[in-house]
Image: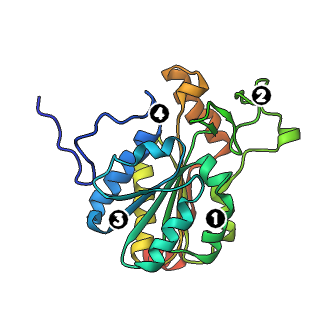
């Protein structure tokens, strides 16, 4: 049986990827590669990845790529976009890089309506450093630093990153949340986010609910249940903010 051809944006000399078995990063990045190929923008894309598990994607794509310091991917890509407006700049990171050490940069970029695309893979904990509690950890979820389960009364509820961005970003921004359990929808959201940047409307943000069976200590069934049931209860999928011009065009 012939092996299917790889998309144009993928490198073919470094497969399989370096992520753990069952990791959601590979699925999110597959959707991103598909979106780039369908939009035929490979020659214009610069891909930036953060420290954390996301750094293992630095050589996945046949794209110009830069790896940044932890939490600094967003401002690096914003600076690149300002210097070279014709480029399509993508910042990819985990929820630690986006919602913890890098949250000040994420907030600033959204408020300034930087014309870049930011993608955050949310797997509810700090995966690369051993599975400690993160801003997105669910109530009652056990991690290395919450062995009895996260206590919402003392540590708060899971951080709603997409909703925060939607609230502070000006008109022209695009904000959505997808999931590795709904790949067709996630690909659509990523394409819309990239198209929003291409059209010059403003800041584009997609959160992707991801999986980490290694640190969750779950089997295949348990992993899928955690993504589709537990995570979905706290993080609602869908488009959260759409530019007015796009809404008007869709209604026409």
Local packing at callout 4 (Cα closer than 10 Å; few below 14, some 14-19, many 20+) is some
Tell me where residue 134 appears, x and y as whole percent. Answer: 69, 41
Sequence-wise, which precedes: disc 4 or disc 3?
Answer: 4
The residue tagged 2 is 149
Sequence-wise, which precedes: disc 1 or disc 2?
Answer: 1
Image disc number at residue 23? 4
Sequence-wise, which precedes: disc 3 or disc 2?
Answer: 3
User: Is residue 16 positioned above or below 35 on the image?
Assistant: above
The residue tagged 1 is 105
The residue tagged 3 is 45
- Which residue lies at the image location 88% right of the left edge and 39% below the top edge? 153
Question: How far, Cα to Cα, is label 2 from label 4?
Answer: 22 Å
Question: How far, Cα to Cα, is label 4 from label 3?
Answer: 25 Å
135 with respect to 189 (left or right): right
Secondary structure of residue under mark 2: loop
| Quadrant in the rendering for residue 137 | top right
């Amino acid at each position: 049986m012939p092996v299917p051809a790889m998309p144009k944006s993928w490198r073919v000399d470094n497969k399989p990827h370096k992520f753990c078995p069952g990791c959601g990063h590979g699925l999110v990045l597959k959707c991103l590669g598909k979106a780039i190929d369908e939009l035929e923008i490979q020659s214009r894309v610069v891909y930036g990845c953060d420290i954390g598990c996301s750094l293992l994607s630095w050589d996945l794509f046949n794209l110009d790529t830069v790896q940044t310091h932890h939490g600094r991917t967003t401002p690096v890509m914003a600076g690149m976009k300002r210097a070279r407006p014709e480029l399509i700049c993508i910042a990819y990171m985990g929820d630690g890089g986006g919602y913890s050490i890098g949250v000040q940069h994420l907030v600033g970029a959204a408020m300034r309506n930087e014309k870049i695309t930011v993608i955050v893979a949310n797997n509810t904990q700090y995966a690369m450093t051993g599975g400690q509690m993160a801003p997105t950890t669910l109530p009652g979820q056990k991690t290395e630093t919450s062995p009895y389960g996260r206590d919402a009364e003392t540590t708060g509820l899971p951080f709603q990153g997409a909703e925060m961005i939607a609230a502070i970003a000006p008109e022209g921004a695009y904000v959505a949340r997808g999931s590795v359990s709904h790949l067709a929808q996630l690909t659509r959201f990523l394409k819309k986010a990239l198209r929003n940047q291409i059209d010059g409307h403003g800041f584009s943000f997609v959160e992707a609910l991801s999986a980490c069976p290694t640190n969750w200590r779950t089997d295949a069934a348990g992993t899928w249940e955690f993504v589709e049931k537990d995570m979905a209860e706290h993080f609602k999928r869908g488009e959260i903010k759409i530019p007015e011009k796009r809404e008007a065009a869709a209604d026409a």
